[in-house]
C-alpha cells in the first residue's frame, strides 16, 4: 500500500499543477473576452481574439516540435509558464486593441507549445500501467476547471474588474511553475540542448529533417496515425460545430439567454458526471472501447443536439456529448502516449496539431458562410452525420483483435 502511494506522489503533484493551471486558463479566457468587450464595445473585436489565437497556434505548431524534442521538458515547462505569467500580468496595462492582440498572440503561442511539452513529460514520468488512471484523473480535473473556473471568474467580477481575474491567472501560472520545479527531471543528461544536437546544421535543414521524420514515422505506423487522424477529425468537426452552437440555440431553437445559460450548465454537469464515472470504471474498461464508444456516443450526442426541436432534446444531447467526452479523451491520450515515441512526441504532436488548427480555421469559416447562405440547421446536422460516420470507422479500427497489443496498459509495446 505504501509503495503504491509513493508511486503516485509525483503524479499527484503534477495533477495539482495541471489543475491550478486549468482553472486559471478558464478565468483568463472569460476575463479577456470581457476586457476587450468593455474596451471596444464590439463583438467583432472579441471575435478577433479567436482569430488571433488560431493564427498563433498555426504559427507555433509549424516549428515548435523541433525545439520541444531537443530541450529538457521540465525546464521548458517552467520557462513557458513563467513567460505566460509575465505576459498576462502585462495585459491589463495596455488599452490599445492592437497591443492586446499582440500579447494574446504570444500568450497563445506559449500555451500551444506548453501542451505537447507537458504531454511528453507526462509520458516519460508516468509508467505505462498508471497512464490510463492518470488520464482519467486529468479529465476529472479539466471538468472541474470547466465548472469552477467560470464560477470563480464571475465571483471576482462582482468584487472588482476583469483585471483582477487576469492577475489571478498570472498568479496561478506562477504557482504552477513553482510546483513543476519540485518535479523530477525525467531526462537528466539525455537532452543536451538544441545547439549541441544540431551542430552546424541550419534551422531550415533541422526543420526539413524533422518533417521528413514525422512523415516516415506516419507511413511506418499507418494504423497508429490512422487512429490519431480519425480522432483529430472528430475534434475539428466538434470545434467547427461549436462555433454555431450559440446561434443555433438562440435563432433556430428560439431559446432565451437564460435557457441557453441553463443548456451550457447542463453540458458542464455532463462533463463532471462523465469524468467521475470514467474515473470509477477506467481500470475495468479497455482503452480501445474508451476511444471507440466514447467517440461514437459523443457524435450521437451532437446529432441529437443538432436535430432537436425542443429544449429537452437539446439538453439531452448536450448532456450525452459532454458525458462521453471524458471517456474518449482518456482512451485517446493513453493510446497516444503508449504508441508515440517520447523522443519524437513533440514533433509529431506539433506538426499534426498544425494541420488540425489549419482545418479548424478553414472548416469554421466554411460552416459560417454556408450557414449564412443556406441554414444553420443544415450545416450542423450534416457535420454531425459526418462525425458519426468518422466515429464508427474509428470504433471498428479500435476494436480489431489483431491490434489489441497497441491498447495494452500493462507493459511497454
Image (tube, rainbow, N blue to C red):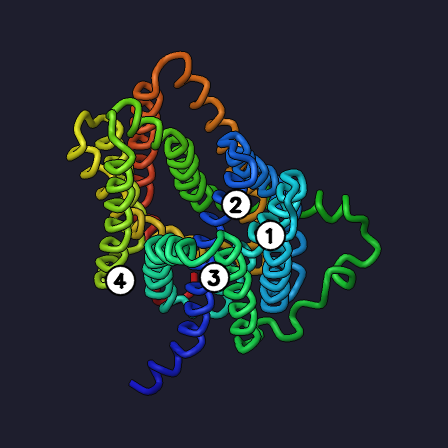
Q: CA distance from mark 1 to mark 4?
A: 39 Å
Residue 242, visible in the rendered structure? yes
Label 3 or label 4, whichever lies nearer to me, is 3
The residue tagged 1 is 92
Q: Which residue is mark 2?
A: 35
Q: Residues within 10 Å of mark 2 (few under 14, many from 20)?
A: many
Would you name the residue on which mark 4 appears? 279
Mark 3 nearby-residue class (10 Å; few <14, some 14–19, many ≥20):
many
Give the residue number, with chain letter if any, for mark 3. Answer: 21
Which tag is nearer the camera, tag 1 or tag 4?
Answer: 1
Indicate whether 259 appears above or below 92: above
Whichever of callouts 1 and 4 sits on the residue coming sooner in the sequence is 1
Q: Nearer the viewer, residue 384 or 251?
A: 251
The residue under the point 40% across, 66% down is 128
If you read the primary sequence from the N terminus, does the residue marked by circle 3 or circle 4 appear first? 3
Asked if residue 391 lies left or right of residue 222, the reply is left
Residue 69, picture quadrant: bottom right
* Disc on the earlier residue, 2 or 4: 2
Give the farthest residue toward the top. 373
Reading the chain from its start, which is encountered first: label 2 or label 3? 3
- x%, y% of residue 393? 32, 35
How far separated are the C-alphas under marks 2 and 4?
Answer: 36 Å
Circle 4 — which element?
helix
Q: Secondary structure at mark 1?
A: helix
Q: Residues within 10 Å of mark 1 (few under 14, many from 20)?
A: some
Q: Quadrant of residue 130?
A: bottom left
Q: Position of residue 180 (x, y in %)?
A: 54, 71
Judged from this view, the residue extending furthest toward the right is 200
C-alpha span from label 3 to label 4: 21 Å
Looking at the rendering, in which quadrant would you find the N terminus? bottom left
Amino acid at each position: 500500500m505504501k509503495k503504491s502511494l509513493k508511486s503516485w506522489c509525483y503524479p499527484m503533484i503534477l495533477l495539482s499543477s495541471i489543475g491550478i493551471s486549468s482553472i486559471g486558463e478558464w478565468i483568463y479566457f472569460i476575463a479577456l473576452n470581457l476586457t476587450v468587450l468593455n474596451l471596444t464595445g464590439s463583438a467583432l473585436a472579441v471575435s478577433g481574439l479567436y482569430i488571433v489565437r488560431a493564427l498563433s497556434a498555426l504559427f507555433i505548431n509549424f516549428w515548435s516540435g523541433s525545439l520541444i524534442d531537443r530541450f529538457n521538458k521540465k525546464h521548458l515547462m517552467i520557462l513557458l509558464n513563467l513567460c505566460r505569467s509575465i505576459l498576462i500580468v502585462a495585459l491589463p496595462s495596455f488599452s490599445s486593441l492592437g497591443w492586446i492582440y499582440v500579447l494574446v498572440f504570444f500568450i497563445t503561442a506559449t500555451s500551444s507549445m506548453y501542451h505537447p511539452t507537458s504531454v511528453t513529460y507526462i509520458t516519460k514520468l508516468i509508467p505505462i500501467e498508471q497512464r490510463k488512471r492518470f488520464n482519467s484523473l486529468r479529465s476529472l480535473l479539466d471538468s472541474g476547471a470547466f465548472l469552477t473556473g467560470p464560477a470563480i471568474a464571475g465571483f471576482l467580477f462582482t468584487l472588482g474588474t476583469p483585471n483582477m481575474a487576469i492577475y489571478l491567472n498570472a498568479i496561478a501560472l506562477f504557482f504552477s511553475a513553482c510546483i513543476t520545479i519540485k518535479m523530477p527531471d525525467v531526462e537528466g543528461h539525455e537532452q543536451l540542448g538544441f545547439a549541441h544536437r544540431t551542430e552546424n546544421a541550419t534551422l531550415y535543414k533541422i526543420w526539413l529533417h524533422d518533417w521528413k521524420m514525422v512523415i516516415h514515422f506516419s507511413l511506418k505506423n499507418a494504423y497508429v496515425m490512422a487512429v490519431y487522424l480519425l480522432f483529430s477529425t472528430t475534434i475539428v468537426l466538434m470545434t467547427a460545430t461549436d462555433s454555431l452552437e450559440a446561434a443555433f440555440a438562440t435563432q433556430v431553437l428560439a431559446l432565451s439567454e437564460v435557457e441557453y445559460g441553463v443548456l451550457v450548465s447542463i453540458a458542464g454537469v455532463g462533463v463532471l458526471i462523465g469524468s467521475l464515472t470514467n474515473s470509477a470504471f477506467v481500470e475495468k474498461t479497455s482503452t480501445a472501447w474508451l476511444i471507440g464508444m466514447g467517440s461514437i456516443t459523443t457524435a450521437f450526442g451532437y446529432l441529437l443536439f443538432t436535430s432537436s426541436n425542443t429544449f429537452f432534446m437539446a439538453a439531452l444531447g448536450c448532456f450525452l456529448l459532454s458525458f462521453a467526452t471524458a471517456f474518449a479523451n482518456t482512451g485517446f491520450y493513453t493510446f497516444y502516449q503508449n504508441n508515440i515515441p517520447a523522443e519524437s512526441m513533440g514533433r509529431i504532436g506539433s506538426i499534426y496539431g498544425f494541420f488540425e488548427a489549419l482545418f479548424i480555421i478553414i472548416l469554421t469559416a466554411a460552416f459560417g458562410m454556408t450557414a449564412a447562405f443556406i441554414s444553420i440547421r443544415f450545416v450542423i446536422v450534416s457535420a454531425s452525420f459526418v462525425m458519426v460516420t468518422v466515429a464508427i470507422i474509428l470504433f471498428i479500427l479500435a476494436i480489431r483483435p489483431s491490434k489489441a497489443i497497441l491498447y495494452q496498459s500493462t507493459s511497454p509495446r
